Image (spheres, rainbow, N blue to C red):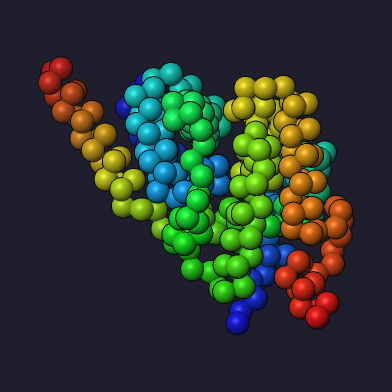
């Protein structure tokens, strides 16, 4: 069983680090877990429905533009 | 908006979608409802794109729309949708190592137990990387309010997950259980 390495997640953004420090230490276990949880979802492949939707919106916009011309 | 700015808007929108979706899934109790929410947000953002000022923070703008959409739908439905059958946990499409998966489910459960306003505050600051100022703007409240919500959320999460205070670099909760056997 592979142990996920949550401690390697580092906050690259210094601004982010500064803002978190006030109430949340950037190296606390909670923040590490939050980042881990969040990045796991972020890394999921985007469901096709999103691209379909964006294409539809794009298409509708083009058609509208053509109708105006 | 110029054609060039429109292209940038679309590209940046696409780039922000994974974070936006992660926020929705963290906020809402079921994954399919979260995808509905993100789609509603995209449609709304698209129709409002003329009101977006190019060069300003698109991510914060999109998160604001998503959050407003979330609360207006919640008001419409009268209450928050509960994950009564653990739809989220069972549907979690990610396949991390087993260890991570258990960990994530526990963490999600802990997050869900927070009041919505504390949940969103700690997510915006601790996970999405927004500044307190941005988070306050997104949640339409004072910076101090965000700070106190984050603090309360942190304390609750630490209690639920049995994590000791800040700066504790000891083993995580699962390792502790194993070590303590």
Place of residue A26 in the rendered image (x, y in percent of width and height, measured from the top left): 77, 50
A23 sits to left or right of B41: right
A22 sits to left or right of B94: right
**Residue B23 falls in image quadrant:** top right
Q: Is residue B69 visible?
A: no
Give the residue displayed 72% in from the left and 22% down from the top: B142
The one nearer the camera, A39 or B51, is: A39
Place of residue A64 in the rendered image (x, y in percent of width and height, measured from the top left): 18, 23
B5 sits to left or right of B103: left
B169 sits to left or right of B90: right
Q: How many marks?
A: 0
The one nearer the camera, B11 or A19, is: A19
Give the residue displayed 38% in from the left and 27% down from the top: B44
Give the residue displayed 61% in from the left and 47% down from the top: B112
Place of residue A31 in the rendered image (x, y in percent of width and height, measured from the top left): 72, 52
Give the residue displayed 19% in from the left and 23% down from the top: A65
Q: Is residue B142 above or below residue B117?
A: above
Q: Image quadrant for the N terminus of chain B?
A: top left
**Residue B103 falls in image quadrant:** bottom right
Q: Is residue B77 visible?
A: yes
Q: Is residue A34 above or below residue B169?
A: above
Place of residue B20 in the rendered image (x, y in percent of width and height, measured from the top left): 49, 42
Q: Image quadrant for the C terminus of chain B?
A: bottom right
């Amino acid at each position: 069983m592979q142990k996920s390495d949550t401690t390697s997640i580092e906050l690259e953004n210094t601004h982010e680090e500064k803002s978190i420090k006030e109430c949340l230490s950037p190296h606390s276990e909670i923040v590490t877990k939050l980042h881990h949880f969040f990045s796991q979802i972020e890394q999921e492949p985007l469901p096709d429905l999103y691209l379909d939707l964006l294409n539809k919106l794009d298409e509708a916009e083009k058609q509208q533009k053509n109708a105006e011309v | 908006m110029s054609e060039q700015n429109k292209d940038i808007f679309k590209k940046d929108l696409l780039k922000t979608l994974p974070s936006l979706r992660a926020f929705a899934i963290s906020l809402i109790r079921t994954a399919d409802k979260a995808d509905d929410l993100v789609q509603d947000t995209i449609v709304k953002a698209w129709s409002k794109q003329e009101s977006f000022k190019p060069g300003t923070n698109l991510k914060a703008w999109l998160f604001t729309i998503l959050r407003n959409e979330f609360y207006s739908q919640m008001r419409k439905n009268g209450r928050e949708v509960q994950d009564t059958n653990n739809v989220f946990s069972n549907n979690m499409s990610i396949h991390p190592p087993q260890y991570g998966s258990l960990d994530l489910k526990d963490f999600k459960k802990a997050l869900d137990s927070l009041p919505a306003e504390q949940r969103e505050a700690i997510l915006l600051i601790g996970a999405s990387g927004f500044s307190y100022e941005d988070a306050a703007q997104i949640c339409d409240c004072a910076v101090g309010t965000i700070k106190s919500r984050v603090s309360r959320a942190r304390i609750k999460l630490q209690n639920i997950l049995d994590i000791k205070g800040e700066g504790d670099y000891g083993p995580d909760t699962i390792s502790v259980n194993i070590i303590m056997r």
